[in-house]
Image (cartoon, helix red, strand yellow):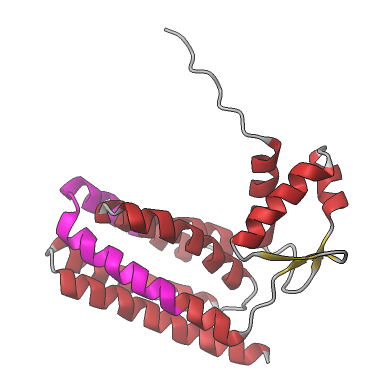
């Protein structure tokens, strides 16, 4: 037997992942300046891979690069945040619809397991990062069940923005606990291969979530 060669990521890729995770973790708030020099020193890199990574994050709408001024975490209005989640709702609804049509029995088992894991997470002292990870796993199983290359190319990047926005918004723990029951209703519709019901329940799930976001944004004013 022989070991497969380790796939080495470029410095730009490493810088990109590091900065993205720091953004999602809430290290910087909307509008805050990001120091290229500080990140380069932390990673032990030159400035070039850090700048290239930030250019990628600008395309993904995490940051804004202002020539001759600096790099800043992108500011979002309440309307822009709600518009983002409304667009994601449509994509997630389609994914659930296709999952009901194309999903395999073993994938349904994985979906149920993902929701049980999420239930365990919300039963413990609450940690946002842990919740984000498990919730993403649930939605990723649905995405795999949908068997759509187009959705696979679109949704994961939107999930990163989801977590980025949620990190910058205050929530109450009970807001997340009701997710479990909503997920169970989605699973039920997918299990019965009811395309329309699966889409409806996913969109209903997101509508409840969007109302929660609206309420939290109004508290911040």
Picture coordinates of residue 215, whole percent (x, y): 54, 89
Picture coordinates of residue 40, whole percent (x, y): 82, 45
Is 39 on the left or on the right of 185, as rendered? right
Figure label count: 0
Is 154 on the left or on the right of 110, as rendered? right
Q: Main secondary structure of the magenta part?
A: helix
The single residue placed furthest to the top in the displayed view is 1
Q: Nearer the viewer, residue 179 or 104?
A: 104
- Looking at the rendering, the stretch of residues picked out in magenta corresponds to 86-115
The single residue placed furthest to the front in the displayed view is 67
Q: Nearer the viewer, residue 94 or 1?
A: 94
Q: Is residue 136 above or below residue 107?
A: below
Q: Is residue 113 above or below residue 162?
A: above
* Residue 114 makes an appearance in the image: no
Q: Nearer the viewer, residue 10 or 2?
A: 10
Residue positioned 69% across, 49% down in the render = 53
Picture coordinates of residue 203, whole percent (x, y): 32, 77
Which image quadrant: the C terminus? bottom right
Q: Nearer the viewer, residue 221 or 58?
A: 58
Residue positioned 71% across, 54% down in the render = 54
Picture coordinates of residue 17, whole percent (x, y): 64, 47
Residue positioned 66% across, 48% down in the render = 16
Location of residue 142 (image quadrant): bottom left
Is 84 on the left or on the right of 70, as rendered? left
């Amino acid at each position: 037997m022989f070991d497969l060669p380790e796939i080495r990521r470029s410095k730009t890729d490493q810088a990109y992942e590091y900065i993205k995770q720091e953004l999602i973790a809430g290290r910087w708030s909307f509008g805050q300046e990001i120091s290229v020099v500080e990140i380069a020193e932390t990673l032990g890199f030159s400035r070039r891979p850090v700048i290239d990574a930030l250019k990628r994050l600008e395309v993904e709408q995490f940051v804004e690069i202002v020539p001759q001024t600096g790099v800043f975490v992108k500011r979002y209005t309440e309307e822009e945040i709600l518009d983002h989640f409304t667009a994601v709702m449509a994509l997630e609804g389609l994914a659930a619809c296709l999952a009901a049509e194309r999903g395999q029995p073993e994938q349904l088992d994985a979906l149920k397991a993902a929701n049980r894991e999420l239930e365990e997470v919300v039963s413990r002292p609450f940690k946002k990062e842990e919740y984000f990870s498990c919730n993403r796993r649930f939605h990723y199983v649905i995405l795999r069940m949908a068997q759509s290359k187009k959705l696979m190319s679109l949704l994961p990047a939107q999930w990163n923005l989801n977590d980025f926005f949620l990190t910058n918004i205050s929530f109450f723990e009970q807001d997340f606990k009701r997710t479990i029951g909503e997920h169970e209703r989605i699973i039920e519709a997918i299990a019965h291969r009811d395309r329309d019901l699966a889409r409806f329940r996913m969109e209903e799930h997101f509508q409840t979530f969007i109302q929660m976001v609206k309420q939290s944004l109004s508290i911040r004013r």
